[in-house]
Amino acid sequence: MILFFSPKNDSDLQRLSETLSDRFKQPVFIERRSEVSKDFVCDVWKTDRSLPREELVYLRQELQRFRKIDLIQISSFLNNGALFCFDMDSTLIQEEVIDELARYAGVYEEVAHVTKEAMEGNLNFHEALQKRCSYLKDLPVSVFDELYFKLHPNHGVPELFRGLKNKNAKTAVFSGGFTDILERFKQEYSIDEVRANYLDRTGDKLLGTVSGTVVDKNIKRDSLLELQSRFQIGRENIVAVGDGANDQLMLEASGIGIGFHAKDGLKANISNWIDFASMDVLLYLFEE
């Protein structure tokens, strides 16, 4: 089936149905789901056919000629007790934390350039991380206390986590960022599991290096599989959400992998992504 997400103030159920009917040369009946998101509606086409990626891309482009509408294809709705795994930077929050730390260190341009290359998949993640972290040498550890309160969750994130808690869903965040930020985020949003990188320090200063297991694309995937086994949750009830190329393996290991405000490097290899809707539309994935 296919879910369509449209802004409440710019949704047209009839036009959507007519566009799909014209495209597939048969009557297409669309149902509007009960309201979950405060700003976006969800219309569902309960079709048994599974559209190939090329058809989904074409359909998305056709629909976006008229309005800001997103679509994702799923085989079934989720049951309560699902597992949601997220990337952090530019997915759950608007910022890239390492770029913001670089602002404090006065090396933003240098670090932002390396970050962009890494997120587009054009640079080895481990090398890029070490190179970026080296610019942070001698920053005070207290910078995390100041920075955390300047980060902005993406639209719908607080509502999503409240809704997931009500659905008894397990939640996890796997980040190529840093434990100092993730532990604070975990506490604020009652996240079950977080994985991130540890910045070495001595006294109250950062050393500019990372120790321990680096959270890269493989660790993100492996962490999802570990939680799947630990919580005994079927793959069909696992959702993974990310924005960059280093999230692809995690998305592929899930039952429903979704790019959120995704970079082109990720979009080129996935079928489902969200360009416009708020994060809380993911609550429409559950059975009513």
Image: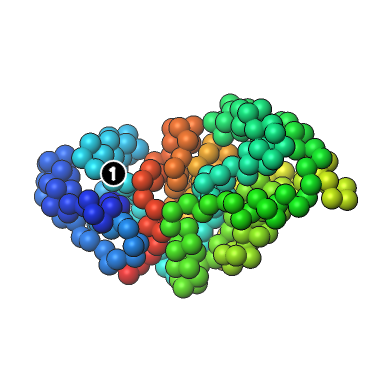
Q: Could one spot residue 50 in this view of the protein?
A: no
For the C terminus, the image quarter is: bottom left
Tell me residue 36's x, y (percent): 34, 65
Can residue 49 be seen in the rendering of this structure?
yes
Q: Looking at the rendering, which quadrant does residue 156 occupy?
A: bottom left
Image position of 226 with respect to 53: above or below: below
Point out residue 73 in the picture as x, y percentages from the top left corner. 34, 49
Q: Amino acid at mark 1?
A: Lys
Q: Please state if 74 lies on the left or on the right of 66 as rendered.
A: right
**Closest to the observer: 46 or 187?**
187
Q: Please tell me which residue is depicted at 27% across the width and 51% down the height of the picture.
A: 6
Q: Residue at x 45, y 62 (%)?
A: 160
Q: Residue visible at 32% across and 46% down?
A: 70
Disc 1: which residue: 68
In the visual, does 77 lie left or right of 169?
A: left
Number of numbered discs visible in the structure rendering: 1
Residue 129, horizontal then vertical, whole percent:
70, 36
Q: Residues within 10 Å of mark 1 (few under 14, many from 20)?
A: some
Dot 1: what SS? Answer: loop
Residue 101 percent across, percent down from the top left: 68, 42
